[in-house]
Image (cartoon, rainbow, N blue to C red):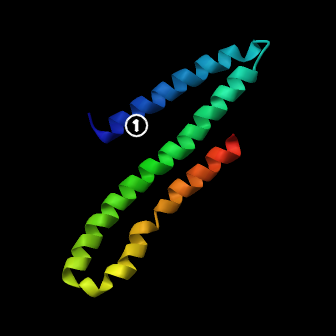
Amino acid sequence: MTKYNKIVLASLAFALVSTGLAQEAGAANNDGLYEGLRAVGAGLALGLGAIGTGIAQARIGSSLVGAVAEDPSKAGSLLLYFLLPETLVIFGFLALFILN
């Protein structure tokens, strides 16, 4: 299964779940639904931020190792570029607390 097929399949699953939740809108008690969707949003904020950070650090890390192998004196300054994507997780963690 290619990457694009997985994206289409995930989009279809989200569309089906959202239509199922939209049909429950007439229920008398929507507080539970609101709390649940807020928790899902907080989890997605942190989870997708962590996945993005992992992908970015994997690519940057391999380039960092190659650059340090050529010139070890640049290791300290290049380490900053490796740590820069970690801010995505920090922003996701901040969104987690804002949503809760």
Residue type pointed to by label 1: Ile
At x 57% / y 50%, what residue is drawn?
92
Q: Position of residue 54 (x, y in %)?
A: 38, 53
User: In the image as oriented, which residue stretches furthest toward the top?
Assistant: 27
Q: Is residue 88 left or right of residue 100?
A: left
User: In the image as oriented, which residue stretches furthest toward the right?
Assistant: 28
Q: Position of residue 25 (x, y in %)?
A: 73, 17
Write down the quadrant of residue 71 in the picture.
Answer: bottom left
At x 46% / y 49%, what residue is drawn?
50
Q: Position of residue 31 (x, y in %)?
A: 75, 23
94 or 29: nearer the eye?
A: 94
Q: Is residue 36 left or right of residue 55?
A: right
Q: Quadrant of the N terminus?
A: top left
Residue that numbered label 1 is attached to:
7
Is disc 1 placed on a helix, strand or loop?
A: helix
At x 55% / y 38%, what residue is drawn?
43
User: In the image as oriented, which residue stretches furthest toward the bottom?
Assistant: 73
Up/down of 68 relative to 1, above or below: below
Count every numbered label the image shows and give the total. Answer: 1
Up/down of 23 relative to 90, above or below: above
Up/down of 67 relative to 43, above or below: below
Q: Position of residue 94 (x, y in %)?
A: 63, 52
Up/down of 45 relative to 24, above or below: below
Characterize the local packing of mark 1: few (<14), some (14-19) or many (20 or more) Cα atoms within 10 angstroms: few
Q: Is residue 20 left or right of residue 13?
A: right
At x 58% / y 50%, what residue is drawn?
93
87 or 23: nearer the eye?
A: 87
Q: Quadrant of the C terminus?
A: top right
Write down the quadrant of residue 66 in the picture.
Answer: bottom left
